[in-house]
Amino acid sequence: MRSAFLAFLYSILMRGFLRIIVGVKYINKEVINKEKQFIIVSNHNSHLDTMALMSSLSFRQLSKTHPIAAGDYFGDSVTKSFITRLFTNAILIRRTKDGSSENPIEMMSRALSEGRSLILFPEGSRGEPEKMQEFKKGIGILLQKHPDIKYIPVYMRGMGKVLPKGEKLLVPFDTYVMFGEPSTTKAAEIEEIVKEVEGRIMELRATFIKPIANSEEE
Amino acid sequence: MHFLQSDKFEQNREVIILISIILGILVFATVLFFIWGRIKPTNQLKELKMRTNSWWVMASIFVLATILHPVVSFVAFGLLSFAAMRELASISKNVRDDDRRVIIWCYLAIPIQYFFAYKGWFNIFIIFIPVIMHVWIPFMLVIRGITTEIGRSMGVLPTQMMLTIFSLSHLAYLLSLPEIPGFNAGGRGLLLYVVFLTEINDVFQFVWGKLLGRHKIIEKISPNKTWEGFIGGVLSTAALAYFLRFLTPLTEIEAVLIGFTIACSGFVGDVIVSAIKRDIGLKDTGTLIPGHGGILDRIDSLSLTAPIFFYIVYNLHYV
């Protein structure tokens, strides 16, 4: 029932809305549908990011994939956290360390052990439109604990223009969601893993904006 | 289902003939390139194949939009304008980032403009964007209260609306033109006529340029455009305009002159969009990744030929 609801919401309504109205274009999306379990790691500029990533999943993957969301933002009221959980399957974590709540890494790690997939934004918050911030360590710890799980680097461009932080009005602009090849991590140390993942996303980013200097014009 | 069917399409012999010609050309090109690829595959062939594939998509959309119920056509053209406007707004560096809210007004103008076209309200249709929106957009920018570099947005946004919304909506308006006694093909015929001639003119100029091209016209903007390609394209298009005039109420001389006009204005539209792309540093407008063409690349010539063709035909035969 719930998976049917999510499938309807994302595969039909959301995908149609994102593609036709917002102008989201998926590049190399096929890679994701072959994977059983994965961690999607992406840059983060907008609330739309989660929607765009969820809409790229297949029916079966949808109900088993959980975006990681900030509990202090989305969980600060009962209604807000109910809506977040209902629509996104999210795992809510606390960004501040006060000892009262469960360790976020533990929560994510347990979900992975249960065979579930995660969507992670290691920048932590949406930040300035179209700028990338330094990655947090969490992704490194997770991949070190689960070295056999593949991560999929994703670079999104334009979301920060469509719906930036602090804005309520959505303005359609062409937006790109670019998937990299899924792979397990090669590094062993936490810092190295974080660097590797960040580097993969930067690689994707570098394929954008090619100057035309030497290319042939039609 | 009758919503999706237009009552008179089956009787519109002229339109059926042209659609068959288009299908014939596409099938011919596809088979030709397939056989060519079997014998001697080259890189250039790959590009030609890709172009043919995007022509299939474009042709199917246009043909479906023309033969189905007019409402479907108006919605389809409206979406085309929207996608083109969005693409232009996304790649443009000449609009201030903080003006994103004003761009909503540009998008909202699209359904209004197409509604006027659907209703056939000619007087408001021709002034809505060039007059009303040309006042409204700058006013909305002024209300924001930030004057630093406001001229950039004031100049660019209305121009983008002219290129993508105003001009393309003339294609849709062709379907709202009244019937002329003795002329059977109607608005659908005119629509297919101008779209087909515009696109085939691009192909002609490309082919003639490849075959005979020596002297560049404007090297800095479009290095592959040559005088030989241009003249060959103009002559071929004019000849084709003459033979296809059964789709229009035009006389023989009018058809030839319109062929010339479409070919020349198509060329101008093409180089205008090329220049915009050069300014931004892109080859194709649609995506920043090589190999995927954008919507603007397909409609660049149309955005000039559509209104020019419309006003010539309108003033010759509908006033």
Image (cartoon, coloured by chain):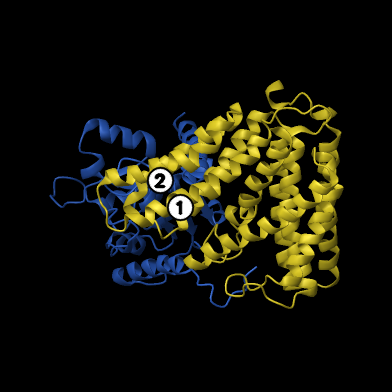
Chain colours: A blue, B yellow
Q: In this view of the protein, which residue sits in the foreground, B241 or B45?
A: B241
Q: For numbered disc 1, what is the local secondary structure? A: helix
Question: Residue A109, image x and y in percent?
Answer: 33, 53
Give above or below for A47 relative to B220: above
First along the sequence among labels 2 and 1: 1
Q: Which residue is mark 1?
A: B89
Question: Residue A93, image x and y in percent?
Answer: 25, 47
Mark 2 and 1 residues: CB-CB less than 8 Å, in contact?
Answer: yes
Q: Chain of mark 1?
A: B
Q: Quadrant of the C terminus of chain B?
A: top right
Residue at 81%, 63% in the rendered image: B33
Question: Residue B203, image x and y in percent?
Answer: 75, 60
Q: Amino acid at mark 1?
A: Ala
Q: Is residue B139 left or right of residue B16?
A: left
Q: Quadrant of the N terminus of chain B?
A: top right
Q: Which residue is mark 2?
A: B103
